[in-house]
Image (cartoon, rainbow, N blue to C red):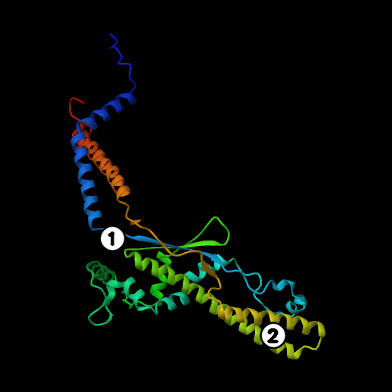
Amino acid sequence: MIDQPSSGRSPGEDNSASLLRTLYRGRFTIFMTMIAVIGLMIAYLSVANYKYSAELSVVSVPKQGGSLSSLPGLSLVEGLGMNLGFGDRGDFVLLTDYVESLKTAELLSRDPEIMHTIFQSEWDEETGDWKQPESAVRDLIADIRSTLGLPQREWRAPDALRLRQYIRNNIAVKTGEKPKLAVFWFTHEDPAFAAKFVTAVHAAVDSSYAESERMKMRRYVDYLRDELEKVTSVENRQAFSALLVNYEQKLMISEVSRYMLAEPMDDVIVSPRPVSPSPALMLILATMAGFMFGFMLVVMRSFFRSKSWQRIKHGPSEDD
């Protein structure tokens, strides 16, 4: 028996060489697939809704009236079970909570321009009222749910609850590296509206917080006045008097302060160019996707023409 000369290549090298030959033979298919995908992306970019970003940087407002922990007799008052709100969470944790609060959404929903712009597809200029937008997809989903016996989702005119969900999905509050710094970030097709809305959200957030704090301070003042008439101990009266003066000062300051939680560092910054979609990034992704689709098409076509597929399809031949 005569040994056949070895090619000196491993099976892996043969497979790689075979794959490269397949790709070379299918280079025209890959190229045309890339051109087709890039063409579809260019068509999308020509009709896409480009969005601009609006950023508003804010800093926390310094607390007025000093620290209550330094007031005389505070431990005596704490022993009476009063909750004076010490140990509150950080300002920007509060900021995030108030951004997503229903109170903030209720304040913003009072502005017709905001509501009509955000829910533009549901506002009818002719009738001056909200309407359910027509949608073939929505009708199809309703038919499917009806067939499956599932309850239908009733359309509801835009209100504070829907605006709250919109804010949750579209307003971002980014905490910066520096302490006591955050950035409100929002994108919209209209750069002027983007600037207006991010400013309005911040104003509503601070207004909601300020009203909540004033209500608490009024309750504290009323409580301390009542207790001051009851206590007889000189030390306790001094403690209550000091607390009462402190909260009355804070309440007066809050009534004239423009901001209580966070104030703007500067004007709103609107991006000069759209931030999404990015044409350069989308074209790069289209090129990569076109190459991958073309690659898979060439490999699949080569496999379906191979003897391996014929054996799978028709069974082994007599030559095998």
Q: Position of residue 216 (x, y in %)?
A: 60, 80
Give me the residue at 74% from left, 79% from top.
Answer: 77
Residue 280 seen by the camera: yes
Q: Does 21 sit above or below residue 162?
A: above
- The answer to whether marks 1 and 2 mark residues whose Cβ atoms lie closer than 8 Å is no
* Residue 21 vs residue 221, the one in the foreground: 221
Q: Does 232 sit above or below residue 154?
A: below
Give me the residue at 23% from left, 42% from top.
Answer: 34
Figure quadrant of the N terminus: top left
* Residue 257 vs residue 178, the one in the foreground: 257
Q: Would residue 80 appear left or right of 59 to someone viewing this image?
A: right
Residue 100 seen by the camera: no
Residue under pointer 1: 49
Which of the two labelled residues, at mark 1 and mark 2, occupies the earlier sequence position? 1
Q: Position of residue 241 (x, y in %)?
A: 74, 83
Give me the residue at 60% from left, 67% from top.
Answer: 89
Q: Secondary structure at mark 2?
A: helix
Residue under pointer 2: 224
